[in-house]
Amino acid sequence: MYYTWKNQLVHILDEEEFIEVRTNRNKYKITQEEQELLRTKKIGIAGLSVGRAVATTIALERIAGEIRLADMDNLELSNLNRINAPLFEMGMNKTISVAREISEVDPFIKVKCFVDGLIEDNM
């Protein structure tokens, strides 16, 4: 996996093996059948101040195959009282920042970013 924003190349397992190893310990709370069903689901999150924690938790638990992020705001220093984001991402749209974080946890989760926020055209 090549992370362009970090100029880093990381060797990882292929998708199926990656998902199996990464979610193996979930089986005590989410059965294999439930994991396979959740993998087909899409979850949308509008607003990525508090929503950032929700989005990253969904990615960590891998309870969706696709995450759709909507927020028109950019990260500002005043957001860091409630958002865990690196300083070097200040000025970046929140959806892009969260998408990068999700990709660094699990590059096989599909992420769609709506940088104009939640509007009629993307609902």
Image: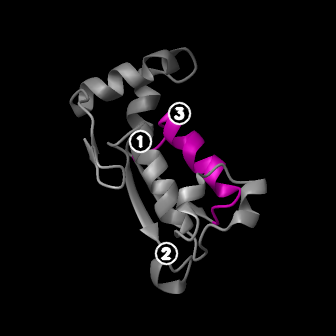
Quarter of the image with the N terminus is top left
Q: Report whether 109 appears left or right of 76.
A: left
Q: Is residue 52 magenta?
A: yes
Residue 94, image x, y percentages: 56, 65
Residue at disc 3, secondary structure: helix
Circle number at residue 104: 1
Residue at disc 1, secondary structure: helix
Tell me the mark number nearer the camera, choosing from 3 and 1.
1
* Type of amino acid at the residue the image marks with label 1: Glu
Residue 57, image x, y percentages: 59, 40
Badge 3 or badge 1: first in the primary sequence: 3
* Tag 2 residue: 115
Q: From what the image shows, is residue 113 above or below residue 118? A: above
Tell me the mark number nearer the camera, choosing from 1 and 2.
1
Q: CA distance from mark 3 to mark 1?
A: 14 Å
Question: For the point 58% across and 51% down, which residue is it?
Answer: 86
Q: Is residue 67 magenta?
A: no
* Tag 3 residue: 61
For the image, the number of numbered tags is 3
Q: CA distance from mark 1 to mark 2?
A: 20 Å
Q: Nearer the viewer, residue 98 or 61?
A: 98
Q: From what the image shows, is residue 114 above or below residue 22? A: below
Q: Nearer the viewer, residue 68 or 95?
A: 95
* Type of amino acid at the residue the image marks with label 2: Val
Chain part drawn in magenta: 47-65
Q: In the image as oriented, which residue stretches furthest toward the bottom? A: 120
Badge 1 or badge 2: first in the primary sequence: 1
Q: Nearer the viewer, residue 15 or 76?
A: 76
Badge 2 or badge 3: first in the primary sequence: 3
Residue 5, image x, y percentages: 36, 55
